[in-house]
Amino acid sequence: MDVVLSENQTLLQQATRRFVEQEHPVVQTRRLADAKAAFPAETWTQCAAQGWVALFVPEQHGGMAGEAEGAVDAAIVAEELGRQVFAGPFASNAVAAFAIANAGSDAQRAQFLPGLASGEMQAAWCFAGTGPQAGLEPGALTVSDNRFSGSAGFVENGANAGLLLVTARDGQGLSQFVIPADHPGVSVEPLRSLDLGRGYATVRFDGVSVDNGALLGQSGAPGGNFERQLQLALVLQCAETIGLIDRAFEFTLEWVRQRHAFGRPIGSFQALKHRLADHTAEFEAAKAAVAYAAKAVHSSASDAAIAVSIAKSQCGKQGVEIIRDCVQMHGGIGLTWEHDLHFYLRRAVANQSLLGTPAMHHERIAALAGL
Amino acid sequence: MTLATCEDRDTDELRAFRLKAREWMAGRLPPRIPGQPYMDWTDKELVAADRRTQRILWDGGLAGITVPKEYGGLGLTRQHETVFGEEAAPYRLAWHLGNNYNIVQPVLLAHGTEEQKHKYIPRMLNGDHIWAQMTSEPSGGSDLFGLITRAEKRGDKWYINGSKIWTTGGEDSDMGLCLARTDPTLPKHQGLTMFMVEMHQPGMTVRPLTLVNGTQDFCQEFLDDVEASEDNIVGEINGGWAVATTQLAAERSATSRGWYIGVGASLPRERIEIASHPVKLAHELGLAETQRARQIVGEVIALEALRELVAQRASKGIDAGTLPPTTGGVASLASSTLNQRASELMTELAGPCGVTGPADGGEPEQGMDRVWLFRIGGGSAEMLRNTISERHLGLPREPGPGKDVPFNQLRTNAAS
Ligand SMILES: Cc1cc2nc3c(=O)[nH]c(=O)nc-3n(C[C@H](O)[C@H](O)[C@H](O)COP(=O)(O)OP(=O)(O)OC[C@H]3O[C@@H](n4cnc5c(N)ncnc54)[C@H](O)[C@@H]3O)c2cc1C
C-alpha cells in the first residue's frame, strides 16, 4: 500500500495480517479446494466481524464508514487477503455495500447494510455479459418496464450470495437493482474456476420483473454509480494481486537464499538475481499505481478512472509474470500440487483476466485520453 | 497537468528569497526553449551561453544555494533550492555545468582540504570552470575500481599515463576529476588515488567521439605524462576508493533528484499526466479507430504514468523512512524498463512509418528510439540489477577473486 499510512491504517494492516495468518492461511484455501467446498457462511460472518465490509457502511447501519478512508482502507485489507489467497467473498460484498451506501434509498440502506456489514447477508455483483470480450462493460443485461433479462457472466460469489446487485441497460442509460437471488426468473449456474479459492457463476435473468423498491438510485442514470463501483472493484482486485506478489516474492527470496546448486545458493546466480531485480522494479511500479488509484477512487478524483486502468494494466501483466517466474525459480517443487505457489498463480491469472484484461484496459485508457 | 508549487507554503524568509530570485532572473536569463536539449556539447554557443548564465546567477547572489558561505555559496537549504527551481522554470539554466553542482561540489565538500575548497568551489559557481568526470576507461567502466590508468610520483610532481573515455563534455571542460592507480601491488580497491587535473595542458589529448545519434557529447582522453601536484590530490593517496564512492553516491542522488536543476523532477504532480505523444501519433497515422493502435496508445499512456508514479513513491517513501534508500535504484531501473517498453510499443505503432520519413526531415523518430535507447551511462542496467539484488534484496554476491589479491595479479583488458 501507500508508503505513508495513518496510525489507524497501520493498525488495520497489522490486525488483518495477524487475523488472516492465524485464521485463514493459504492452507485453508487448499482445504476448501480439496473438499470442493464453498466458503462457509458462518466463517464469513467471523471475517466480517473484523469490520472489512463495515468500512463502507455508515455508523447508523452498523458500520464505521465515518472513521474510514473507504477504498484506501479496503485496499489495505484486500492486499492482506491476497497474501494468503483468501477464499472468502470480500470484494463482492464490499462493492455491494459501497453501492447501496452511496445510491440506496433509506429503506434499502436500512434493509441491507447491517446484514452486509455483519456478514450475515452476502451479495454478488452482476453486470458483465458472457464471452471473451465481457468483463469490463455493462450491457449484456437489458431492462424495460422493470423487467429485465439476459445473462451476467463471471459473477464472483454468484452461487453463494443471497442478494444480487444487478446493472442493466435501458433506453437512456444504466439502471441498478438490488434483488434477492431466489427471485422468480433468476437462475444461477456455478462455473468451474481456475482460481481454486474463488467461485464464479453465470446468473441468468429470464424476464425478471421487479417493483420500484428494487431500483437502486435513479433509472437510466448516466453510469456514474456503476463506474465508481467498477473502480472500487478494480482497486480491490489489484490490491489483492499486490498481496499475492508480495507473499510469493517473499518466499521465493527465502528459497533462493537457501537452495544450493553447484556449491552455492541459487540466489547468487546472476541469471536469477537480475530477474528478481527486474521483478522488484515492476512490482514497485505496480504498488505505486495501486496506492495512487486507491486514493483517487476514495476521493473521487478526476483521474480515478484512468488511475484504476493503469493499476490494472501493471498488476494484471506483472502479477502473472512475476509469480510465474517465482514458480520457475522453484524448480520441480514449484510444479507440485503440494506447494502453495500454484494457488497464487491461479489467483493472479484469474485477476488478470477478470474485470477487463490489460488489453481491454489499454483501450479504455485510450478512450479516456480522448482518442 | 498541475505542478504543485510551494509558494503558498513559503515562510517569510523563503518568500524574500523567491522575490529576489524572480527579480534578478527576469530579463537577464535566456528563455527556456521547448525542444531544446538540456545538454548538447556540439553546440559550442550553447555551452558558452551556459557559462554566462552561471556568471549572471553568481553576480545576483543566486549561485551555490546550498554551498556553505565560506566557499562562495549561499549556505541555504534544499527548500531554497526548490524555490529557486520554481522561479527558474521560464529560463534555461547552466545545465552544461551539471557536473559542477551535482558531483564535484559534494565530493570536494566531503573530502577536499580547506585550501582546495576555497580555490575551486567559487570558480565552479561563477562559471569559470566546467568540470568533467574522468572515471571510465577503454579497458572497462562497470568494473570502475579495476581501472588501469597509472599515476606515479617523480620528484614533487605526479605524472598520469593512460586513457579515459566516455567523458561527457571533455573537450569543453576546464578541470577533470580523474581516478588513477597509484599502487598496483595493493588489492584493486586500495591502490587508487583521486586527482584534479587541468584539461588543457601538455600531455593531454582530447578527442571527441561521435555517438549513434550524431552528437559529440563524449570524448576520449589520452594522458601522456599529464602533470598534477600534491595539492591536486583529493583525499588520501591510495584512498581514492572512498572519494569515488562519494562521487558515485552523488551521481545516483542527482540522477534520482533530477540532474538538471530547475527541471522539476522532484516536484510532485497532483494528477496523472496523460502522455499526448501516442495519441498524436495515432491520429497522424490515421490509426485512431484501429483496435491494436488504441491498445498501444493506452498502454504507452499507462507506462509513462507508471514512471512518474514509481519515482514519486520512491522519493516519498525514502523521505518518510518507510522505504530503504536503495529503493532509489529500484525506481530508476523501473523507469528505464518502462521507458523501453513504451518505446517498443511506439515503434510497433508507427510500423514502417517509424523507420522512414521525408528526405528533408529529421532522423525517423520511433525507430531511432530503438537504436538509441540503452541504459549504460551512470552505470549500466546490469550493474544496477547487481546492486538491487545484492543491496536491496540482500542476495549473495557472485564469487570472484578474493578481495586481497594484489591488483597486478588480476586479469584486465590492458593492451599487452
Ligand atoms: C550517456 C553516458 C554518459 C557517460 N558519462 C561519463 C562520464 O562523464 N565520465 C565517465 O567516466 N564515464 C561516463 N560514461 C561511461 C559509463 O559510465 C560506462 O560506459 C559504463 O560504466 C559501462 O562501462 P563500459 O562502457 O566500459 O562497458 P563494460 O563495463 O565493458 O560493460 C559491457 C557490458 O557488460 C556488462 N557487464 C559488465 N560487468 C558486469 C557484471 N558484473 N554483471 C553483469 N553485466 C556486466 C555491462 O552491463 C555491459 O552491458 C558515460 C556513458 C554514457 C552512455
Image: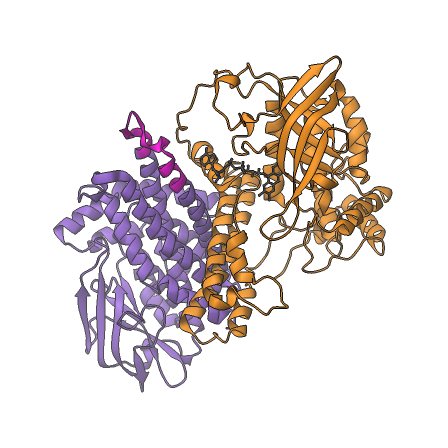
Total numbered labels: 0
Examine the rendering and report whether any part of residue A293 can be seen.
Answer: yes
Q: In the displayed image of the protein, which residue is found farthest to the right?
A: B59
Residue shown at 30% from the left, 29% from the top = A258
Image height of B169 relative to B297, above or below: above
Question: In the image shown, does B322 or A309 lie closer to the viewer?
Answer: A309
Magenta stretch, main secondary structure, is helix
Horizontal arrangement in the rendering, residue B106 relative to residue B309 (left or right): right
Horizontal arrangement in the rendering, residue B146 relative to residue A355 (left or right): right
Image-quadrant location for residue B205? top right
Question: In the image shown, does A162 or A236 lie closer to the viewer?
Answer: A236
Q: Is residue A273 magenta?
A: yes
Residue B181, position as x, y percentages in the image? 61, 21
Q: Is residue A144 magenta?
A: no
Q: Which chain is orange?
A: B
Q: State the scheme by which the image is colored.
A: by chain
Q: Quadrant of ligand 1?
A: top right
Question: In the image shown, does B405 or B139 lie closer to the viewer?
Answer: B139
Residue A282, position as x, y percentages in the image? 43, 48
Image-quadrant location for residue A201? bottom left
Residue A252, position as x, y percentages in the image? 32, 38
Examine the rendering and report whether any part of residue A45 can be seen.
Answer: no
Q: In the displayed image of the protein, which residue is found farthest to the front?
A: B416
Image-quadrant location for residue B368? bottom right
Q: Which chain is purple?
A: A
Image height of A16 relative to B27, above or below: above
Question: In the image shown, does A290 or A263 lie closer to the viewer?
Answer: A263
Residue B248, position as x, y percentages in the image? 59, 33
Q: In the displayed image of the protein, which residue is found farthest to the left?
A: A35
Residue shown at 36% from the left, 83% from the top = A170
Magenta segment, which residues? A256-276
